[in-house]
Amino acid sequence: LAQETNSGDFLLQNLSLETVSNLASNFVTIPFEIAGNLNAKGQLGGSLTNPEVTNGQVAFVDGSVNDTSLDDVEVTFDYVDSRLDFDTNKPDYLQASGKVPFPPKPDSDRIDINLKLATPAMALVSVVTQEQVAWVNGEDRTADIELDVSGRLELADSIKIKDLSGTSEVNIQNGTIKTKLLEDDFTLNVVGKFKLDDQRLEVVNYPDTEGQKTLEGDLAGIGFSVSGELPIVSNRTNTSNPLTLNIPQDNLKLAGLYEGGVGGNVVITGSALRPVIAGNISLENGQAFIPKAQETKTEESDEKTVKNTSNQTPSVVRSRNNNQFVPRLKNFQVSLGDELRVQQFPLYDFRLAGDLTLNGPINGNLQNLTGLGTIKLRRGEVDVLETEFVADRRHNNTIVFVPEQGLLNPNLDLKFTTIAFEPSGALRQRRIDNEILENVLQSSRPDQVKITLAIKGQTSQILALGGEKDYCADQQITSSGLAKLGSKTTILSRQQFQELAECVYGEAIANSEDKEFLFSPIVTLSSTPPRSESGIIALLGNSFITQFQTIANSNEREIAELVITQYVVRPIIKNILFTVEEKVSNVGRSIGLADLQVYPTFDAVYDLGQTSSVELSYDYVFNEVQVRYKLQF
């Protein structure tokens, strides 16, 4: 080395990326966790005031970005007259070249970079999106992305690129994408061109379409177009022409999430690294599926050791979680349409309508999202103890989302009803104390009991057990009374035997799959005529026992016929009957009735006031008419 002339070679081996990262962090913010080692060599020349490097080579080996391993990268470069010229040799799918002035001078401060990415480079999508979105490799799946940028380099306080401009062309054919929120992969086709100007991306035009500033493509089989602009890094407002995704009304199929009509406009502001998503999506005649709960991982240490397959010392890279790519929803509107179906057959089947506003980060965990809005349950069936409960049409069934409670914990105000019959000749269920039973006429049909299942409270309370229920205590059966069962001379009265039956059945239910639901503090059971809660559960259990006995006493053919009737024919008939009942109910309301139904019995209800009503009932099978007066107190 000399002040006027330099001559020699240099060699650099196993320089930890941690060292480079720490030095670079003084000038720029690195948005990813980078690990690996650098090797470099070249020929020195020039002078101390104007150094030169020729025939330079740099290799990035054993590298990873956000714990995703990368192929080795090799770059050749020359540094002459304060200008760095570089070009990549490998990998083939990543070609980068450029000219960078360093240090920049007033008459020589332009930076020019060209980047070409081929299909294998799409694996970096998972790196940029923190593994929320990933590219799936395949023979017929291609992607070509080219980027040309230029600008002025400034080193006043930190490394800045001003007057940034350039273009980017994107061509993706049969691309296959997977995401944590969906069960199946989906396809992506997109062709278009971006312009980079003043540190913002702007959609320029669709190929072969003069003057049309859109990017065209299709996702999961439905078309879309993109227009507008988006800042790259800064959060400058771009409300005049924000990046907008337009989705014409079409049918969408995303396995495990949604099937049906969809359309809308999605507006993206913020920046490319931290997008803020607003706009609206409208669903039509769709069916939604409850996604599987995401497992929450414990936070890792801020220091991560990246696996190194060589004998080189592994790099320890500091976590920069505050710079992760996490899109965020801001007042994103979702319209469910007239009837969105949510079903898990045969457990429940709901038809919903309403609007919902979503906010929060999109990071693969729905618990981090919040919702605001009211969803109405237009129709619903739920299975409890092998008994089908139907949404009460007379009740305003709602699901209210409150931001403070999160998206998965809305307030429920729902009522479901069913009809149960006490078999002829069976012991009559014990009434509660304030019921006075006085049959003027004996009915030839079994006692009909209308059971109401009410749910009122937060969804999370369904799984929050309010303590174990003691059905034997509910029936006031003392331990001394039960002890008498050990005596051969035990004689139980009719009432005591009924109490014991309810006690035993109630305790059996305590160990069933419906335990958490029935024991929830927001779930209540009531009936007309009134029954105790354990009595209602025992009554519901009769249908399960009857069905079990039917199956046990049936041959294979009879069981097959039962399954077809129960799970194929019955749902079809039920849909037809619901349509008829809905029209009949509307007719009843138009003539002043609170409710009117024609199946399985003819029932007309007229409200005399807020606490009293008269019900006229006709049973087609037994050819009986009943008139009931009800008073709530």
Image (cartoon, helix red, strand yellow):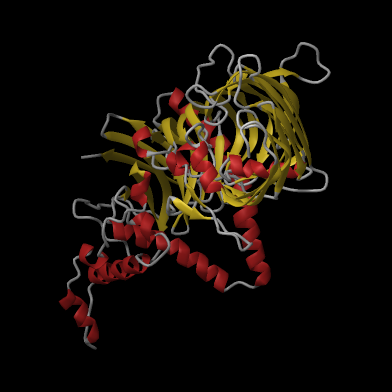
**Picture coordinates of residue 131 (x, y %)?**
58, 46
Left or right: 450 with respect to 48? left
Can residue 417 be seen from the camera position used here? yes
Q: Nearer the viewer, residue 255 or 611?
A: 255
Which quadrant of the rendered structure holds the N terminus? top right
Q: Which of 499 and 139 is in front in this view?
A: 139
Query: Which image quarter: residue 336?
Result: top right
Q: Is residue 104 above or below residue 495?
A: above
Q: Nearer the viewer, residue 175 or 583?
A: 175
**Picture coordinates of residue 613 (x, y %)?**
31, 34
What residue do we see at 37% from left, 49% from top? 451
**Picture coordinates of residue 394 (x, y %)?**
40, 34
Left or right: 324 with respect to 254? left
Q: In this view, does 340 lie above or below 543?
A: above
Can residue 423 be seen from the camera position used here? no
Query: Which image quarter: residue 575?
Result: top right
**Picture coordinates of residue 262 (x, y %)?**
63, 30
What residue do we see at 56% from left, 59% from top? 313
Q: Is residue 350 above or below residue 171?
A: below
What residue do we see at 44% from left, 53% from top? 300
What residue do we see at 58% from left, 40% from top? 129
Which quadrant of the rendered structure holds the C terminus? top left
Q: How many marks?
A: 0
